[in-house]
Image: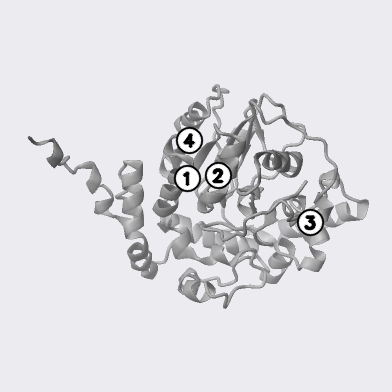
Amino acid sequence: MSTPALIHDRILFYEAKSTPVSQTEIAIPSRWATNIVNTLPLDGQRFAAIVGAPRCGTTTLARYLSAHGDVQFSTVKEPHFFSQYDLTSLEDSELKATVENHYLARYFPGASPFAILMEGSVTYLYAADQIRAVLRVWPDARFIIAVRDPFAMLPSLHQRLLLLGDETVADFAKAWALSPIRAQGKRVPRTCVDPRWLQYPEIGKLGKYVQKFFDVVGRERCLVVVLDDQIADPAATYRQVLSFLDLPDDGRRDFPRHRGSRGFKLGWLQRLLKRPPIITRSILAGENFRLRLKDIDHARTDRWFVQAVLKLHAKLLDWNEIPVPPAVLAPEMRDVVRDALRDDVVKLAKLLRRDLSHWLGGLPEAAAHLTEKARPDPSAAD
C-alpha cells in the first residue's frame, strides 16, 4: 500500500503547496508502514472537526465535546493529519486504507463505530483544499469554525507561540513588522515549527479563510461559533453545537473556561522543552508531539527510561511556566491592525450576516450590511 506524500516536515496551514501523490510514492516514514489490521469501518462512521481559528475557544469546545458520551475525540486534540499530508490524489481504495491505517489507528484506537469521531486541528481552516480528502471518506462530515476579534486573537496567538517556542520576539509590534521579512525565510527562529504561523497579518484574515472553507466543503456543512457568544452564553453555544452535530443534550451545566494565558521564566528552557532539537526529539519532545511520530504499534508505550524523562520533562515545564495576564494589543498597534484587517472583518460580517461593528475597536461598516435596503432587480422590471 502506498502512503501519502509528506507536504513538509513541519505543520502546514494556509494555502499549503503540495506535490500530488503518485501510487509509487512512499513519504510517510517507513516505521509507520506496519501491517495494521483496519480498526474501523468507514461506512456509516460519522466525522466532525473543529478546524480553527487558533486562540478562538477551540480547546474549550474540544474539552466539552470530548466528555460527551456519543463523541470519540482524537487522542491528540490536533493531529493536523489532513493538512500535513496531501491525500487528494489517492484513489478511493487507497485513500480509505491510508486513513484507516495511519489516521484512525493512531488517533482513534478502539473507537466505537457508533460514536462520532472528532478532532480539533486549527490548521484545517487555512488548508481548505486538503479537506477535500475528508469529504471523500466522510461525505457527511461537519465542521465547526471558531472566530474571534483579531484585536484579541492575534496578541493571544503571539503569546501562545512564545510559550511554544515558535516565536522569540517578545514585542508583538516588532513581530508583526517582521512578517514580510519572515515570509522570505529570514529572521525565523530555528525552533519554529512552521514559519507561516508567524505571518500575523495573514492569520488574522478570518473572512478570507472562512469564505474559502465554505467554497470547498459547502456552507451547509459548517457552523461558525463566534467567541463573543461562547463567552456570553456558553450553555446556549454548546447546545447549538450539539444540535448541529445531531447529538443529544447530555445535560452539561458546568462550562469552565480552559487554557488561561501562560508565560515562562526561562525562554531557552521553554524552547528546549517544547521544541527540542531533532536529534533529541524522540525523548525530549512532549507526549502529543511524540504520538504523531512514533510507530503506531508503540504509540502508547515507552521504555522505562523514556517514561522517566517524560516525567522530568513535565516537572520542568510545570516549574518554568507561570500564569500571565492575557495579551492586550498595544495602543500604537491598533490603527496598524485595523487598517490591515478592516476589509476582511467587513467580509466576515457579511458572510456571517451579523453585526461585528464592535470588532477592531469599533468598525461601523461591519454592520452596514444589516441596514442596507434591498435594491430592486432591474431584470424584474417590465
Q: Is residue 102 left or right of residue 133?
A: right
Q: Earlier in the sequence, mark 3 or mark 1?
A: 3
Disc 2 target residue: 132
- Residue linked to disc 4: 221
How far apart in space, not on screen, are marks 3 and 1 (Cα)?
Answer: 30 Å
Callout 1 secondary element: helix
| Quadrant position of residue 187 | bottom right
Q: Earlier in the sequence, mark 1 or mark 2?
A: 2
Q: Secondary structure at mark 4?
A: helix
Q: Do labels 2 and 3 touch, CB within 8 Å? A: no
- Identify the residue at horizontal 46%, vertical 37% (top origin): 223
In the rendering, which numbered label is found on residue 29? 3
Of residues 222 and 58, the one nearer the viewer is: 222
Q: Amino acid at mark 3?
A: Pro
Q: Is residue 232 above or below residue 357?
A: above
**Residue drawn at (67%, 59%), measured in percent from left and top?**
321
Give the Cα separation between the discs numbered 4 and 2.
13 Å
**Residue depicted at x 36% and y 49%:** 348
CA neighbours of label 2 inside 10 A, class few (<14), some (14 to 19), many (20+): some
Query: Mark 2: which amino acid?
Result: Arg
Q: Position of residue 5 (x, y in %)?
A: 69, 55
Disc 1 crowd, CA 10 A, few/some/many (<14, 14-19, 20+): some
Dot 4 or dot 3: first in sequence order is 3
Q: Disc 1 designates what residue?
A: 216
Quarter of the image holding residue 228? top left
Q: CA distance from mark 1 to mark 4?
A: 10 Å
Closer mark to the observer between disc 4 and disc 2: 2
Q: In this image, 334 relative to 374: left or right?
A: right
Sequence-first tag of 1 and 4: 1
Q: Position of residue 41 (x, y in %)?
A: 71, 29
